[in-house]
Image (spheres, rainbow, N blue to C red):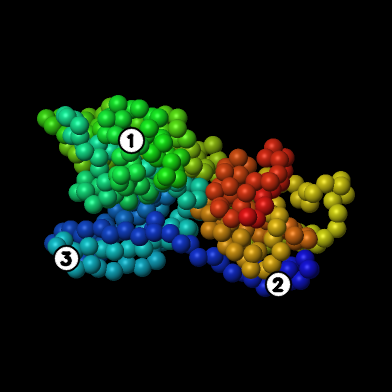
């Protein structure tokens, strides 16, 4: 069975997985006396590319990150297509190759998001006097909040604020930072990240916010801003920075680590190990910090879905088959981060669950 699986797998090794993401799509207003001219278009493309890099890194200030200046100097290198959107003002709609850009930034040591960003449930109360009102979907403030989050690549969830929520938590609980009822009400939304905020919009705009991860407060601030928009922007920027610290892959410590190394599968590679027993009597056929074992892969379709999902993880440049034996396969991952980052990245896939010793190579997972 495993020999047949391997032979069929080799036919599909050249297939390139789709990069299903909206991170590379931007819309930028054009300005100047000639909005369709080269100068206006180049400025808009540069601005759009900077927005995409902000989404991919989760950082508020990207200009000083490794590789960013070079990327911004040549936005056409990453441009897939663009078009004009009629209206006042005229806008440029552009789509950048966010996968190639992610790999480029990771190779140069810039931090990039490792896989899909988890959503953040936001309990935001407006008006600092009296009871206040909770911001829910459809509120004008919710739309402004969503716009800011989209620029930063942060996925927000707002509470339904239906009878089920109201029976569990009150606005006073949110304002008073009573985490018991707040976390109980948050369970239905199935996210570890919960943010609370109280917006005081008077003579001086103030936003008092906190961020909780798994029920534990990890950050918070009482921040002043020049208006509501500035307060929301600073709020989302702070949330994104905190999450990027946890989920971003790479950074200065890894700068240049793999820049000169060829992706897995390029050039001469050792042939896959077919069947046979490990001489040591164990289950490990290859020992490498960038090799993962997956058990329970018994069909070609299961293998192809798995490889597509692995190759679609942002910082992963390539995925190469190294072992096909019985009901398990081993992949070598071309990846710019370390072992712990790879483990966290692969564990984010719903199709896999940990089923090995995390301290011993290789990382081992079972197909759900």
SS class, disc 1: loop
Number of numbered labels in the structure image? 3
- Name the N-terminal-most of marks 2 and 3: 2
| Residue 98 quadrant | bottom left
Horizontal placement of 312 versus 138: left or right?
A: right
- Rendered-image quadrant of the C terminus: bottom right
| Residue 208 quadrant | top left
Indicate which disc residue 169 carries.
Answer: 1
Q: CA distance from mark 1 to mark 2?
A: 55 Å
Q: Nearer the viewer, residue 227 or 180?
A: 180
Residue depicted at x 78% and y 48%: 284
- Name the N-terminal-most of marks 1 and 2: 2
Indicate which disc residue 87 carries.
Answer: 3
Please, is residue 359 above or below residue 351 in the view?
above
Q: Nearer the viewer, mark 1 or mark 2?
A: 1
Q: CA distance from mark 2 to mark 3?
A: 52 Å
Give x and y (percent) for residue 91: 22, 62
Q: CA distance from mark 3 to mark 1?
A: 44 Å
SS class, disc 3: loop
Please, is residue 49 above or below residue 280 in the view?
below
SS class, disc 2: helix
Residue depicted at x 20% and y 34%: 132
Indicate which disc residue 8 carries.
Answer: 2
Residue depicted at x 41% and y 46%: 189
Give x and y (percent) for residue 127: 18, 34
Give x and y (percent) for residue 276: 85, 58
Verify CB contact (< 8 Å) between mark 3 and mark 1: no
């Amino acid at each position: 069975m495993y020999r047949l699986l391997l032979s069929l797998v080799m036919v599909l090794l050249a297939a390139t997985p789709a990069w299903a993401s909206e991170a590379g799509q931007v819309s930028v207003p054009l300005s100047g006396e000639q909005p369709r001219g080269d100068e206006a278009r180049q400025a808009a493309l540069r601005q759009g590319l900077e927005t995409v890099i902000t989404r991919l890194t989760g950082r508020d200030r990207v200009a000083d990150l490794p590789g960013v200046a070079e990327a911004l100097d040549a936005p056409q290198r990453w441009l897939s297509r663009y078009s004009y959107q009629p209206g006042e003002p005229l806008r440029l709609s552009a789509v950048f190759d966010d996968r190639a850009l992610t790999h480029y930034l990771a190779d140069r040591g810039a931090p990039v998001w490792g896989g899909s960003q988890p959503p953040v449930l936001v309990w935001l109360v407006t008006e600092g006097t009296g009871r206040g009102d909770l911001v829910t979907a459809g509120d004008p403030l919710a739309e402004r909040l969503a716009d800011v989050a989209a620029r930063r690549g942060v996925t927000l969830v707002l509470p339904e604020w239906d009878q089920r929520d109201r029976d569990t938590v009150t606005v006073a609980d949110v304002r008073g930072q009573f985490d018991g009822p707040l976390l109980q009400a948050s369970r239905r939304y199935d996210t570890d990240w919960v943010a609370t905020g109280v917006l005081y919009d008077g003579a001086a705009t103030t936003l008092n916010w906190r961020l909780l991860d798994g029920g534990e407060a990890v950050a918070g601030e009482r921040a002043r801003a020049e208006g509501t928009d500035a307060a929301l922007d600073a709020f989302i920027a702070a949330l994104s920075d905190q999450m990027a610290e946890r989920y971003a892959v790479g950074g200065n410590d890894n700068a240049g680590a793999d820049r000169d190394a060829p992706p897995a599968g390029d050039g001469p590679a050792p042939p896959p190990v077919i069947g046979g027993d490990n001489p040591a009597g164990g289950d490990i056929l290859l020992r490498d910090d960038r090799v993962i074992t997956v058990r329970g892969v018994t069909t070609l379709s299961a293998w192809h879905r798995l490889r597509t999902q692995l190759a679609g993880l942002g910082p992963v440049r390539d995925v190469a088959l190294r072992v096909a034996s019985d009901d398990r396969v081993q992949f070598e991952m071309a990846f710019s981060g370390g072992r712990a980052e790879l483990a966290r990245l692969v564990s984010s896939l719903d199709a896999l669950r940990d089923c090995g010793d995390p301290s011993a190579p290789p990382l081992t997972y079972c197909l759900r």
